[in-house]
Amino acid sequence: MSLIPEVKCRRCGERFSSLRSRCPNCGTRRVAQSSRTPSATPGTVSGTASYERAGTNTRWQMIFGLILVVAVILAVIVMVSTSLNGTDVSIKPNRPAASTPSPTPNDAPVVEAVPTPTPTPPPTVEVLQIRYNDDEREEFTISPGEVVPINAYVSPLTITDKVKWTSDDPDEEYFIITVDPDDGNKITVECLKYSETPLNIYAEIFGKKVGCIVRFRRA
C-alpha cells in the first residue's frame, strides 16, 4: 500500500501520484481541489434580517399557492354544476341528423296534385243583331207556307262560337226553325199557320240576348 495518495487524470482517467503536477500519460495539468468550505449565506443564518425576509417570502408564496389552488377548485366546481344544470350554452352536444324513414312496400306512392288550370274568361260580345235581308230587324211578317231566312250578326268577328236560337213557340205549332248546318248563325223560319198573337225569336251568345217579333198575316 502506497503512502502517497494518487489522483485521477481528469482527461484520460489515468491514475498517478499526487506529487506530480501533470499526467504522465497525456500531460494534462492537474488541478488542485480547493479545501475551502463555503460560508453560509445571510438568509440561512438565524437571527439576521435576511433570514426574516426569507421566512416572510416563503409564507407569502405558500399563501398565494393556496389561493391559486382554491380558485382552480372553485372554477372546476362552477363548470361542473353549470354543465349538469344544462345552462352552459357554449358547449352543445352533437345531435344525430334526423334519418329519413325508408319506404316500405305497403306505403302508397304519393301522387302530386295536378294544378287546376285557370279558366279563360269568355269573350265580350260588343254587337248582337238579328238580320233579315242583311238589315237589322226588330220584327218581320210571315204568311202560312212562307219561308223566311234570317241570320245573327256577332261582333267582334273573332268570336267563332255560334248563337243559340230559341222562340216563344217551342212546340213548333206556328213555325219551324231550321238551323243552317254550315253556319249556325243562319236559320230559316217556315210558317205553319196563322197566329193572331205575335211571337218572338231569340238569339243568345255569351250572356248577350236579343229578340225579333214575328207577326202573322192570313194567306
Image (cartoon, grey):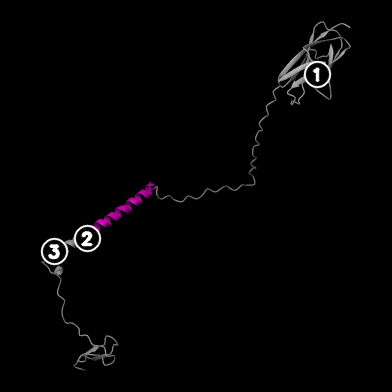
How packed is label 2: few (under 14 Cα within 10 Å), some, or many (20 or more)? Answer: few
Residue at 26% over, 57% down: 68
- Residue 204 at x, y = what percent? 74, 19
- Residue 156 at x, y = what percent? 73, 23
Q: How many marks?
A: 3
Cα gap from disc 3 to disc 2, whole angstroms: 16 Å
**Residue occupied by mark 3:** 52
Question: Which one is earlier in the sequence, the residue at label 1 or at label 2?
Answer: 2
Residue 82 seen: yes
Give amino acid for label 1.
Answer: Asn
Give amino acid for label 3.
Answer: Glu
Identify the secondary structure beneath mark 3: helix
Identify the secondary structure beneath mark 2: helix
Residue 75 is a magenta residue: yes
**Residue occupied by mark 2:** 62
Cα gap from disc 1 to disc 2, whole angstroms: 122 Å
User: Is residue 2 found left or right of 79 in the rendered image?
Assistant: left
Cα gap from disc 1 to disc 3, whole angstroms: 135 Å
Where are the magenta residues, as a range?
A: 65-88
Q: Quadrant of residue 181?
A: top right
The kind of secondary structure the magenta stretch mainly shows is helix
Q: Quadrant of residue 164?
A: top right
User: Of residues 34 and 28, which is closer to you in this image?
Assistant: 28
On-image quarter of the C terminus: top right
Give amino acid for label 2.
Answer: Met
- Name the mark on residue 151: 1
On-image quarter of the N terminus: bottom left
Instruction: Say if mark 3 contacts mark 2, CB within 8 Å.
Output: no
